[in-house]
Amino acid sequence: MADKVWGKFDGDRLEEIIEKGIPIVEKMGVKVLEMAPGRVSLRMPLSGNENHIGIMYAGVLSVMAEMPGGALFLTTFDASRYVPIVKGMDIRFKRPATTDVFVIMEMDQDETERIQKELEEQGKSDFVLAAEIKDANGQVVAVSRTDCQIRSMELSL
Amino acid sequence: MADKVWGKFDGDRLEEIIEKGIPIVEKMGVKVLEMAPGRVSLRMPLSGNENHIGIMYAGVLSVMAEMPGGALFLTTFDASRYVPIVKGMDIRFKRPATTDVFVIMEMDQDETERIQKELEEQGKSDFVLAAEIKDANGQVVAVSRTDCQIRSMELSL
């Protein structure tokens, strides 16, 4: 699995962190579809995550806005030196989700380099991750903007 | 329990809807502390809802921003004629939550009457619910604004 090794982590170990690192998220059944530097893709099953009328619960869609940022951090930055913080999130629910849902989150090379440079110079860097959460038919069920920060472990929370 | 009866629902039944109506929220262990017309209060345990570093997972805090709106709808409006919809949510994480967390959500009489009047005249009404989510020491761990709509069951989604 040499193609799945980045930095200190083996790809399968990274997937395990995302799928099983947070117990309540493991109960939701999130699955990693792709996890590479600058690009992650997750799937969330409808089954077990329905609300009282059988569509995906809004709180679970919020997890699909938040979780990819953590995955992107792990593949793209040095987790032995830095920690990710989620400062806030805005999510707009566009239509009921009646299937499993999917999210792709990406960070291009310029943005990655900007953040890396700020980290080295200032010990922290703020950025925004935008996402569209789509159903199995490719329809957008929610759009989100998550305000993130990465900072050196030396800085206090 | 005559003091806990509103409209068609018995208070204990209402609590059950909030605590057990959505399976993944039941797994989080949310508890109703108070559920009255115009005012609801919920508690979320830290235990079982920690992230990978032992503080409450951001996605669970988001549930504490979303869930009270549903509870407030059930106590304050006629659930046999209207349905609540969450259109969007903005949440800002202020500090790590290292204890159980608590939220109180209120709607005053003027706002309730404004919404009720719009419902009768237009079949739907938009409103914003603001909340502070606090830890066991009374410290604010997150603040949220949720954009809600109530509409007549006759209107299509």
Image (cartoon, coloured by chain):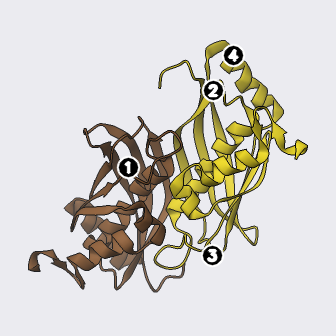
Chain colours: A yellow, B brown
Q: x, y percentage for residue B140?
A: 33, 39
Q: x, y percentage for residue A101?
A: 67, 65
> How many residues crowd mark 2 within 10 Å: few (<14), some (14–19), many (20+)?
some
Q: x, y percentage for residue A138?
A: 76, 67
Does A127 sit above or below residue B55?
above
Q: x, y percentage for residue B118?
A: 35, 71
> How many residues crowd mark 4 within 10 Å: few (<14), some (14–19), many (20+)?
few
Q: Nearer the viewer, residue B98 or A20?
A: A20
Q: Label 1 amino acid?
A: Leu
Quadrant of residue B8 in the image?
bottom left
Residue B46 marker: 1
Q: Label 3 amino acid?
A: Thr
User: Mark 2 or mark 3: which is in front?
Assistant: 2
Residue A120 marker: 4
Which SS class for mark 4?
Answer: helix
Residue A98 marker: 3
Q: Are marks 4 and 1 on the same chain?
A: no
N-terminal label among 2 and 4: 2
User: Mark 4 or mark 1: which is in front?
Assistant: 1
Tell which subunit mark 4 falls on: A
In space, the residues marked 2 and 3 are separated at their CA atoms by: 37 Å
| Residue at numbered disc 2 | A82
